[in-house]
Image (spheres, rainbow, N blue to C red):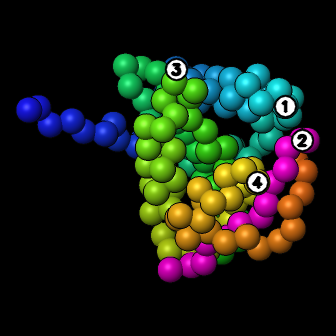
Amino acid sequence: MPETSEPPVSSAPLGQLDPVTLYGILRLRADVFVVEQECPYPDLDGRDLEDGALQLWIEEDGRVLATARLLSEGDDRRIGRVVTSRDARRSGYAAQVLAEAMRLAEGRAIRIDAQSHLEFWYARFGFVVTGPEFLEDGIPHVPMTRSAL
């Protein structure tokens, strides 16, 4: 029986991304967050351009299937824009991207603003709720933190 392997998680700062890959990342974020979730919001918020910001993604056959971004916030890190294409959900790709982002955070505390319905999914990775639920662009979220290791 042939061995199957998971596609690797790639990472790079915005300035080092191939334009086709960048397009795939931004397209996936817009397809899910804006179109599927019916939530027009300013995805291009300038944070992708910050020093230390990394884009993470999984692609197969030239198509981005999952992505996230890792940001520096002082001594802490922030993971956001975690998203998987509709046809790749339940593949484990979001968990792969999140695990790589946590590895790249180099033992620092990590903050996220999780959509409330995903609170228990993030808890599997050691994140705990650190404040009250709030609305962001009309969607309930909870602040969560994973302590520095």
Q: Earlier in the sequence, mark 1 or mark 3?
A: 3
In this picture, residue 105 sits left or right of residue 142: left
Q: Does residue 113 appear in the picture of this structure?
A: yes
Query: Which numbered mark, 1 or 3, is in the foreground of this view?
Result: 1
Q: Is residue 139 magenta?
A: yes
Task: Give, as a single range, the part of the protein colored magenta.
Answer: 137-149
Q: Is residue 48 magenta?
A: no
Query: How far is disc 1 from disc 2 in space, using C-alphas?
Result: 7 Å
Residue that badge 3 annotates: 20
Residue that badge 1 annotates: 39
Instruction: Please tell me the numbered disc located at residue 113.
Output: none
Instruction: Please tell me the numbered disc located at residue 116.
Output: 4
Residue drawn 83% across and 26% down? 38
Q: Secondary structure at mark 2?
A: loop
Residue that badge 2 annotates: 137
- Residue type (three-letter) at the residue carrying disc 2: Asp
Above or below 107: residue 115: above
Query: Which numbered mark, 3 or 2, is in the foreground of this view?
Result: 2
Query: How far is disc 4 from disc 3 in space, using C-alphas?
Result: 32 Å
